[in-house]
Image (cartoon, rainbow, N blue to C red):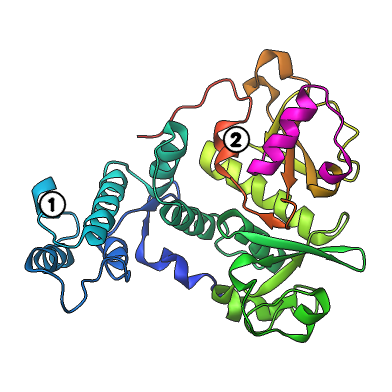
Amino acid sequence: MSAVPDFWLSSGHHLLDRDADGKLMLTDEFLKAYLARPELAPPPDACVAEQGLYRALLNDPRRSVSTGEIDAIADADARENWRQMVAFRDHLLAHSTIEAAYLSLVREGTRVPLLFLDQLMHVILRNILDQTEDAYRLRAAEMFFRPQRLTTHEGSLIAADEEHVGAAAASPLVAMLGLPLTGDLDVLNDENVPGYFERSDRFDMALDLSAGRRGLAALGEVIERWVKHLLAVEVTVEPLTEPCEVALSWYVGLDAEATRIGNALWKGSAPDADERASIVALYRLTFSDPGIVLDRLADEPVYLILAMKADGALRMKPQNLVTGLPIRELVTPS
């Protein structure tokens, strides 16, 4: 039996341990990976205080860091970077698993640099999708932690990684779509699926999100796993083809634009042509155990809305699935 190809090495999953429940446990090696970031590695002309703090944390990444140690750093930008990093590190250390730390951040509305939140989602999804051979699911999961830029071509809705948008180099496909991207870009299909794994850390494959295609179904499957792993709740997520012909008893916007549209629909406003065009997907979510749902919604589905901005930008907010589902009781892990 051949081994399942590895993917997303950049998540740092190989630096973490797992507990008996399969959750991620913090390690010194994972913390040291943050110290290697260019924002923290002191330049040659860094002051003695910064160099000393950096060496001390390389030796013991869990050591206590006082406010005075950071205040002693001469460079103002470096001081701010260290404050944010140490606060984030302390948050991770205060929780038993990476998943618990993430849940605490989003439930309490703690403000952290978006980079840190994206990185946590990246490594948690790598854990959730371990041993997955379905490249469609993996590419759909990238949408959780990497902003996308969407465009239509010959009736298909194509999502590309936003980091590649706006660069000078363009592949033939990008020229065809009118999107300047760095390097080659291929739309994931059944023929090039095997190639996803060797280029997974480049995030340079596009995904077809057209209604009825594999991309939307794969995103729904990732949502199912996300909810089960983080909330221990079994759900089924089904993409719908008529996004405006439903009664929204309860909805969750999967991004800021979707939340705005959902709020308008909730208040009874009919979406205009631009709003209808911006809706990428509508999913019906049902609970395997209706008994965990708020009484007034026990027999009602929950709808998930995904939408793009007028310029095609889309940044998912998976934390809304943690905070927005109508579940009777959720206990935040310590």
* Amino acid under disc 1: Asp
Residue 162 visible in the shown view: yes
The rendered magenta stretch, by its main secondary structure, is classed as helix
Classify mark 1: helix, strand or loop.
helix
Above or below 312: residue 46: below
Are the residues flagged by discs 2 and 1 in contact, CB closer than 8 Å?
no
Determine which residue is flagged by label 2: 233
Which quadrant holds residue 139?
bottom right
- Please indicate whether residue 158 sits to the left or right of residue 241 in the image: left
What number is the disc on residue 26?
A: none
Expressed as whole percent of the image width and height from the top left, the position of residue 297 reads 73, 19
Q: Position of residue 109 (x, y in %)?
A: 44, 34
Q: Earlier in the sequence, mark 2 or mark 1?
A: 1
Give the residues in magenta.
253-275
Location of mark 1 (residue): 71
Residue 172 magenta: no
Task: Give the residue drawn at x 59%, y 81%.
Answer: 198
In which quadrant of the rendered image does the C terminus lie?
Answer: top left
